[in-house]
Amino acid sequence: MNGSVSRRLASILLLAAAPLAAQGHGQKLAGSGLMPRDSQPMPILSDIRLLRETGIKILAADDMTGVAFARITPAEQERLSAKAHEWGRCGGHEVVPIQGESVASLFGSLRAQHIKNERFERSDFRIRRSLTADRTVTAAVSQVSEQNLAETVKWLSSFPTRYNKGPRPNDHIPAVADRLKKLTAGAKFPVKIDLIDHKSTPQKSIRLRIEGKSRPSEIVVLGGHLDSIAMDWLGAGKAAPGADDNASGSANLIEAVRILAKGEQPERSIEFFWYAGEESGLLGSGEIARSYKSNKADVIGVLQLDMTLFPGDGEFVLGSMNDFTSAWLREYFRGLNEMYIKAKIMEDKCGYGCSDHASWHRQGYPALMPFESSFRRSNRDIHTKNDVINKESNFRHSAMFSKIAVAFALDLANSTLRSP
Ligand code: BES
Ligand code: ZN
């Protein structure tokens, strides 16, 4: 048994509960993430081989990336999830909102990134760095506090829910923005905090921008989703503490901000995001990445932190997702790790766009997603009321991800490196 079992079960239970909820328990189901509002087949992206083995009709396929498009019924979704589980995957598919973006353009952007990654892996190009650590970065990394993280995760998970479709989706938002304001009040450089409105959800995202000194238009992005979700027989939206998923990553970013605010102004701008509505289909990050792309924003790299508290493969062993991410940034991360972190990295994949990094990747920006463990050893309690701090929570392990955030932000924002 592993983490994916309970998540798959939750989704199957949800399927069973769908007619009930629709009959007027007043519950809204998890949105585009897992459930259809009615019995219309859902548009999904999944792995070609997975769909073939499950006997699901493929409507369009892209051999280069191995991704296929299909429309599936709830029964097919159940079969797909079961097969995905045999393969050690979570739901094994991603529901795609086909609105402005056609299937062809979805495939197109995935192909472009795939080609770029292949070219990078085949080339002689390697990020040539003197593998000597920078003293400022080393000192900053050493300031990460496990106590701060524990306190912040405790605080965030004490909100009854941070679900984007709950009756009060923004209850926690001003409190987090306020905390960021206090943490950055003494900074020697301009820091701007904004609440971002969305079209696809009433929940707001939070952005904190540190203005770059010499190249402010070059942006280093760090983000994680602040929303949570819980599922049960009647649908979603009950108590959703989301301690690991994703108070942990959110707290890692807050702690990184605290440390950066005490330092010098970076050459490039650094933007931190706490995204809205990730659990309902990457809603906040999807809108943000699309708008950055349409404004031709020069995003150098994107670090995603989603689930960092459960050391499923042991302390200081982390997963690094190698799908929907950039080969260049993964290589860069290996260098950072050697210098500042010294974790054991296990390459793994989600098999679908499992978190906000996929929103940026889809717009052509280089993304990176270090993760608490390998996919199959990850926390089995997520998306339930049991995703709380417990004796398996490990703040020493989680602190490593704040260190990664600090090193990534300081090193990349003070360099001229960019994706080849
Ligand atoms: N934190 C999870 C993603 C995750 C779970 C990654 C387990 C690795 C292991 C994220 O918040 C999530 O639940 N994502 C959704 C997909 C999204 C498109 C709705 C999921 O995985 O079902
Ligand atoms: Zn989740």
Image (cartoon, rainbow, N blue to C red):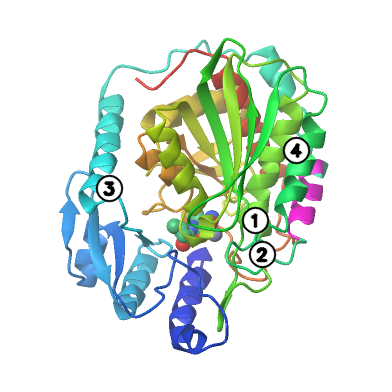
Mark 2 / mark 3, whichever is N-terminal: 3
Indicate the position of residue 107 as horizontal and vertical percent values: 24, 47
Q: CA distance from mark 2 to mark 1?
A: 6 Å
The span picked out in magenta is 148-157
> Callout 4, which amino acid?
Leu
Point out which mark residue 17 bears. none
Specify the amino acid type for callout 3.
Leu
- Secondary element under disc 1, as helix, strand or loop, is helix
Query: Is there CB contact under 8 Å for labels 2 and 1?
Result: yes
Q: Quadrant of residue 90?
A: bottom left
Residue that badge 1 annotates? 244
Q: Residue at x 57, y 9 (%)?
A: 214
Crowding at dot 1, Cα within 10 Å, few <14 / some 14-19 / many 20+, comes out as many
Q: What amino acid is found at the position of numbered circle 1 in the picture?
A: Asp
Question: Which of disc 1 and disc 2 is earlier in sequence?
Answer: 1
Residue 321 appears in the rendering: no
Residues at discs 3 and 1 in contact (Cβ within 8 Å):
no
Neighbourhood count class around disc 3 (C-alpha, 10 Å): few under 14, some 14–19, many 20 upward: some
Q: Nearer the viewer, residue 181 or 112?
A: 181
Q: Position of residue 244 (x, y in %)?
A: 65, 56
Q: Main secondary structure of the magenta part?
A: helix
Q: Quadrant of ligand 2?
A: bottom right
- Tag 4 near tag 1, CB within 8 Å: no
| Residue in the picture at 74% in, 49% down | 174
What kind of residue is marked 2? Asp
| Local SS, label 3 | helix
How many labels were placed on the picture? Answer: 4
Q: Which residue is mark 4?
A: 180
Is residue 87 something that shows in the picture?
Answer: yes
Q: Residue at x 67, y 57 (%)?
A: 170
